[in-house]
Image (cartoon, coloured by chain):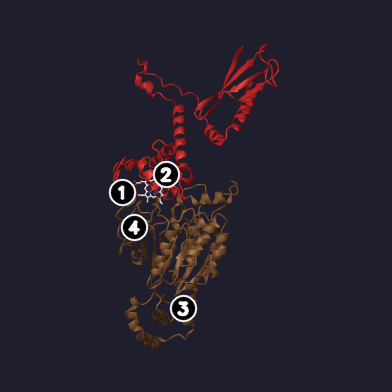
Chain colours: A brown, B red
Amino acid sequence: MAARHKSVETKYYEMRDKLITSLPRLDRRDFFKVMGATGMAAAIKGLFPPHSFQLLEVANAMPLPAKGDAVEKFTFAYISDSHLYEEKLNDQFIRAIMRGIDDVNRLDPQPDFVLFGGDLAQLGQAAELEIGAQLLKEVKAPIKMMVGEHDWYLDMGAKWKELFGEPNYSFDHKGVHFVVLNSVVEKDFWTARGLTPMERMKTVAGLDNSAQSAFEVGEVQRMWMQQDLAKVDKSTPVIVFSHSPLYKYYRNWNFWTDDADEVQALLRPFEHVTVIHGHTHQVLTNRIDNMHFHGVLSTAWPWPYAPEGLPKYTVQMSRANPFDPQDACGTGQVTVNTDGLCDMVYNLWDRNPMHVRASYLKSMGKKDKPEAPTFSSY
Amino acid sequence: MKRPIALLSLACLAGGFLLLRMEAQEASHHHALPPGYTQGSGEILLCDGATRVMIPPNQVFDRETAQKYSDELMELWMQKHPEKEWIMAAAAPAPSPAPTPQKPKEPGKEKATQFEIYNDFSDRDQRIWQEEYDKFVAEGNRIFHNAEAFGGTVGISCDMCHPNGANTHAETYPKYQVQIQRVVLLRDMINWCLEHPTKAKPLADDDPRLRAMEAYIMAQRAGKTMAPNKH
């Protein structure tokens, strides 16, 4: 998020982080001394507010891993696909994202950051994006923004970029290299047909509207990605955030990235790669060689599973109950293990959470299979 | 005295034929000619009984002239009809295949049975049925994808949760819906979704929009085995 949209809390935690990291790093012996002093505190951790100072200091007492070093286990959370309209037209999706924000703010301990998985707005309108930016200020942890097609195709990303910056970027966190992509680039289908910006937007917004092109990352971004990854040691875990799944699931609904093969080729040399994506509004699990893929939930509405192409590792979430408008929606947490692979918690509202563990995909589906749904799709 | 001289079929319009009636205006001492008309001119009247064009005296009617007058009439007619685009679209590709050759009858059975007559439809018939069906389903498709068309008030259309009609399970009706506490038909569930997720008013059972959406949903589930009361 652009600096001016950081919440008061985010700014406060950033300042505090800065202060803590500016203190001389504790060696191992000092670390244990701190541990001793804070042992009691750690034991009664539950009684402390989520950001208990002691806990953070303990975490920071460990040496930060250099590139290629073991990863420090950590968690992040996600909120995704809120599809906001202006409040005067529809306040239901606004209430839903607020519920999502409450979810992540209540997490204890707090996640290191919160991924917003794209499709903040429904029709890419300035007012919709602004409401979204405003609401996301309430998130206590720092936010990592990702763009979706619903944010983009009214003004080709102008407003989104003004609010949140460039849609593709990378960063390192606790030994993991993160790459954030704009995977919803479409070939120009509108000029020849003389569509207005709103007609273009509505065409892309229609999931089953076959008048649009297929999503892709595109050559420009692939080149950027190649350069970015060239600096990264092959043993460093890589986590990619993309709005669309970076593989080919179902073309008709753009549950698909057209240049997925090319993007995967860039990721293949790495030992452990995880792709976390939005767009599909469902529990979705896939593995292709060294790459693990996880879809995330939407706060607005769930999508049915596509009639074909479902990856074999996916254990479906239960069919949604239409009588509960927030059923099969939700948010989630991701625990990044020391090998960089992820344990997913699907925090389905009004239901038990679903767990998709890294061990399930690592064992090619043999271990820790998620529980089958009570109501599968047909 | 009026003397009909030609009956031209022009274009297949929304399943029916648009007929042209050409009437010669005979010189009459009792009636004044309309402005612009001269002695001996005729006019072509569209089957709507209102749209007409004038024809100069002694006009020779070859194929081209006939086309010219029919175009002119259509142009006039369309200017009067705001819904012309829809009607144009409906009129566009009219099936007019050559008549199907009759199946040769088995010797001694020349006389058709009642069943054979009933069953004796041509490719042309089938194409017309297909076209009519497609039109109905397409209208349902349009409404399903457009909140304004069915009266949704929160910007939510059916395709947002049911892309290509997914998860509408038309083949499972009638079935008992626990939350409605009775056995419902497909259209009742459509109406439920209209009222709730899309915040529209429920539609009457014979409302053309409800009928069209029902057709669209069933078309999406073509080939599924009927499974009433499946949950």
What is the number of the mark on residue B201? 2
Query: Residue sitting at 42 percent across and 87 percent down?
Result: A27
Q: The numbered mark 4 sits on a residue in which chain?
A: A
Q: The numbered mark 2 sits on a residue in which chain?
A: B
**How far separated are the C-alphas under marks 3 and 1?**
57 Å
Indicate whether A67 appears above or below A244: below
Q: Nearer the viewer, mark 4 or mark 1?
A: 1
Q: Name the residue under label 1.
A: B179
**How far separated are the C-alphas under marks 3 and 2?**
61 Å
Q: Do labels 3 and 1 share a chain?
A: no
Q: Percent x, y for residue B130?
A: 45, 33
- The crowd level at tag 1 (other Cα within 10 Å; few <14, some 14-19, many 20+) is few
Label 4 SS:
loop
Query: Residue sitting at 52 percent across and 50 percent down?
Result: A202
**How far separated are the C-alphas under marks 3 and 4?**
36 Å
Q: Label 2 sits on what residue type?
A: Lys
